[in-house]
């Protein structure tokens, strides 16, 4: 008997499968980015071979991607644009979902959410947290590391804990900035403190970028990049540390407050492998890999080695220089975005439930203000907590969740507590 020839897998079949996967991912991401009532045909239909119309167009090559920007800054830290102006620029560039990730503050989130509501795009409340990696945990010693945190529409649960950490870091920035100015003075480059704080803006903790701009203004350097390369970089003669927490502490805080943690710009680290290994052990979810020039060699492999989701963003500051990557310029694959949301949404829903449970334990106007910290709900004016606590829950659900999230999350405990509270009064 003759042996049967092994049939080679069909390239066309593989391509069709890939297209179907992308179509399902697109459908999933779009449903979250643009919450609307459930479509006539569900994802289950798609799994059986039928795709919703817009997903079918994607499968045939006629669909469009959904543009996420996962790393951006406003003038609430070291960016040049207000949160509103940043949102407007992102909208003009086609961004559908924008994460505002200012350094060590979430103060710009409410303004960004208000502007985004007018533009019809979605905001991911975020923050880029300054930390130090020190294997021996020696205070003030170690390598500077930045950790991105992404939260759901309701923001962090246990916000007071996170805010206390961020406030301590910001307070340390003032001391750090003064130490940097002292070092610059010893290098015969005096800079006035008043000028640095004016550049930073009222209520904004001064950072190295603000000092770099002051150096440019004073004529000591030609541009911001030169200021960092010659003086302010991590190994520069004017570098100083602040009161940054250790990296593992930051990652654990993000997890405890219902966020997704991602290592920012790992290509700037001296020993990325050791740091990533340590942070993975602490619960790190993801790391930046993609930039405007594509994947950074080696970091994709590191993400795979430690089982981390590969993300990326522009790190947009609005400096107006020709070499700056514009907001929305780093385009992530639809399957990457789908994986990000599949990881994040259960965590965000759990945080939301935690926030509402705390409100149900004491449904007061003051506590309502706390849960609305990152954006007002429609029709919440004149809220009477005893009579309409359950209405607040429903308002929160409609504002924070997509339809499939609303079906998945179990909030009967929250509602029953509010009903019991109202019945006793």
Image (cartoon, rainbow, N blue to C red):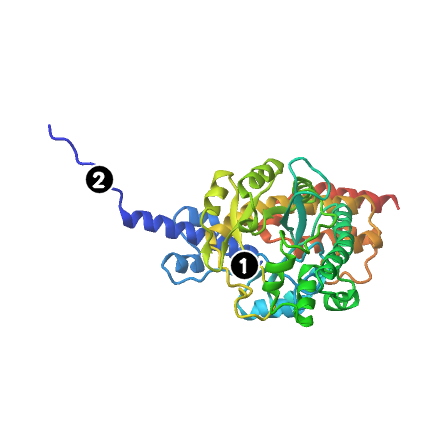
Q: Is residue 317 visible?
A: no
Number of callouts in the render?
2
Q: Is residue 306 visible?
A: yes
Image quarter in which the N terminus is found: top left
Q: Position of residue 191 (x, y in %)?
A: 74, 66
Q: Position of residue 50 (x, y in %)?
A: 40, 51
User: Which of the two discs, 2 and 1, labels the residue nearer the N terminus?
Assistant: 2
Horizontal side of 190 relative to 264 (left or right) equals: right
Depth check, front residue: 118 or 202: 202
Disc 2 residue crowd, few under 14, some 14–19, many 20+, Cα 10 Å: few
Q: What residue would you read off at disc 1? A: 68
Q: Position of residue 40 (x, y in %)?
A: 49, 56
Task: Kindly report which numbered mark, 2 or 1, lies closer to the viewer in this rendering.
Answer: 1
Q: CA distance from mark 2 to mark 1?
A: 41 Å
Marks 2,1: beta carbons within 8 A:
no
Q: Residue most toward the right?
A: 425
Depth check, front residue: 395 or 304: 304
Residue sitting at 65 percent across and 58 percent down? 232
Q: Which mark is residue 203?
A: none
Q: What residue would you read off at disc 2? A: 7
Residue 233: quarter of image: bottom right
Disc 1 residue crowd, few under 14, some 14–19, many 20+, Cα 10 Å: many
Residue 421: quarter of image: top right
Residue sitting at 73 percent across and 59 percent down? 186
Helix, strand or loop at disc 2? loop
């Amino acid at each position: 008997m003759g042996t049967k020839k092994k049939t080679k897998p069909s390239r066309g079949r593989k391509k069709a499968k890939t297209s179907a996967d992308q179509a399902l991912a697109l459908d999933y991401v779009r449903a979250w980015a643009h919450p609307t009532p459930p479509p006539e045909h569900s994802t289950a239909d798609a799994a059986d071979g039928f795709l919703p119309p817009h997903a079918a167009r994607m499968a045939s090559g006629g669909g469009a991607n959904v543009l996420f920007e996962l790393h951006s800054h406003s003038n609430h830290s070291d960016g040049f644009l207000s949160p509103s102006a940043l949102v407007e620029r992102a909208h003009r560039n086609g961004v559908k979902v924008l994460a505002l990730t200012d350094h060590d503050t979430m103060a710009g989130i409410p303004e960004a959410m208000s502007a985004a509501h007018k533009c019809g795009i979605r905001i991911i409340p975020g923050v880029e947290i300054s930390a130090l990696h020190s294997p021996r945990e020696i205070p003030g010693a170690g390598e500077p590391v930045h950790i991105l945190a992404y939260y759901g529409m309701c923001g962090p649960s246990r916000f007071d804990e996170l805010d206390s950490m961020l406030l301590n870091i910001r307070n340390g920035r003032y001391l750090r900035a003064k130490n940097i100015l002292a070092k610059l003075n010893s290098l015969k480059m005096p800079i006035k403190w008043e000028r640095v704080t004016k550049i930073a803006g009222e209520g904004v903790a001064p950072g190295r970028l603000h000092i770099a701009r002051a150096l440019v203004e004073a004529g000591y350097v030609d541009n911001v990049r030169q200021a960092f390369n010659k003086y302010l970089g991590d190994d520069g003669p004017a570098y100083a540390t602040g009161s940054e927490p250790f990296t593992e502490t930051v990652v654990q805080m993000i997890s405890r407050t219902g966020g997704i943690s991602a290592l920012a710009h790992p290509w700037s680290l001296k020993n990325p492998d050791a740091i990533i290994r340590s942070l993975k052990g602490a619960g790190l979810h993801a790391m930046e890999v993609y930039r405007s020039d594509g994947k950074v060699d080696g970091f994709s492999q590191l993400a795979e080695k430690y089982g981390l989701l590969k993300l990326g963003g522009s790190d947009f500051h609005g400096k107006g220089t020709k070499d700056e990557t514009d907001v929305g310029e780093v385009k992530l694959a639809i399957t990457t975005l789908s994986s990000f949301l599949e990881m994040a949404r259960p965590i965000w829903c759990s945080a939301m439930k935690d926030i509402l449970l705390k409100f149900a334990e004491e449904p007061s106007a003051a506590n309502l203000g706390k849960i609305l910290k990152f954006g007002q709900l429609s029709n919440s004016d004149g809220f009477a907590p005893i009579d309409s606590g359950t209405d607040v829950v429903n308002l929160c659900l409609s504002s924070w969740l997509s339809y499939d999230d609303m079906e998945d999350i179990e909030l009967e405990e929250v509602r029953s507590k509010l009903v019991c509270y109202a019945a006793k009064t």
